Amino acid sequence: MSQSYDTIRACLVDEFEVAPALVTPEATLASLALDSLALVELSLVVEERIGVTVADITPDRTLGWLAAHADATLATDAGSDATLAATDATLTAGAVS
């Protein structure tokens, strides 16, 4: 799995004290007995450690979905950063010419 998944998994095991055997990509957040407060805390941890905001975290989401969502958001952000850098470079080159 991805680094995002590994981060989320470690958090669930270490901080939320979920049994490691239960933490699989197919596991829903509800199956891990995470209540609404725990979901809010998990979303804050994901934002802090991975840098991705997850506004629609619900009990029926799977860990695989959460990790894929984080990875896709990071990839989109990286693409935006690359586009911005290329635009900046073009503007700077135009100013120098």
Image (cartoon, rainbow, N blue to C red):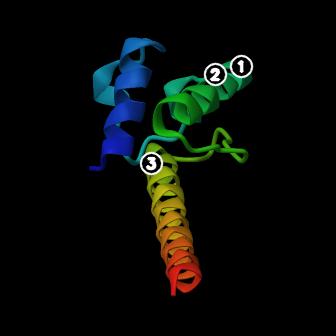
How crowded pointer 2 is (Cα within 10 Å; few <14, some 14-19, many 20+) is rated as some
What residue does disc 2 label? 41
Residue 38: where, in percent of width, then height? 64, 20
- Who's the residue at 44% across and 48% down the image? 67
**Precedes in sequence: disc 1 or disc 3:** 1
Q: Report helix, strand or loop for mark 3.
A: helix
Instruction: Name which residue lies at 58% across and 35% down.
Output: 47
Judging from the image, what secondary structure is the residue with disc 1 in? helix
Give the SS element for disc 2.
helix
Residue in view at x 52 percent, y 80 percent:
96
Residue on which the image places disc 1: 37
| Labels 3 and 2: the sequence-earlier one | 2
Q: Amino acid at mark 2?
A: Glu
* Coordinates of residue 75 in the picture (x, y in percent): 45, 63
Image: 42 above or below 55? above
Nearest to viewer (mark 1 / mark 3): 3
Q: CA distance from mark 1 to mark 3?
A: 20 Å
At x 49%, y 74%, the residue is 89
The single residue placed furthest to the front in the displayed view is: 97
* Labels 1 & 3 near each other (Cβ < 8 A): no
How many marks the image carries: the answer is 3
Q: Check contact, mark 2 vs mark 1: CB within 8 A.
A: yes
Query: In the shown orientation, is residue 23 left or right of residue 73?
Result: left
Please rate how many residues cluster around mark 3, counting C-alpha atoms within 10 Å: few if below 14, some from 14 to 19, many from 20: many
Q: Nearer the viewer, residue 16 or 47?
A: 47
The amino acid type of the residue labelled 1 equals: Leu
Identify which amino acid the numbered label 3 is placed on. Answer: Ala
Q: Nearer the viewer, mark 2 or mark 1?
A: 2
Disc 2 to disc 1, how far (Cα)?
6 Å
Provide the residue designation for mark 3.
67
Circles 3 and 2: CB atoms closer than 8 Å:
no
Q: Quadrant of residue 43?
A: top right
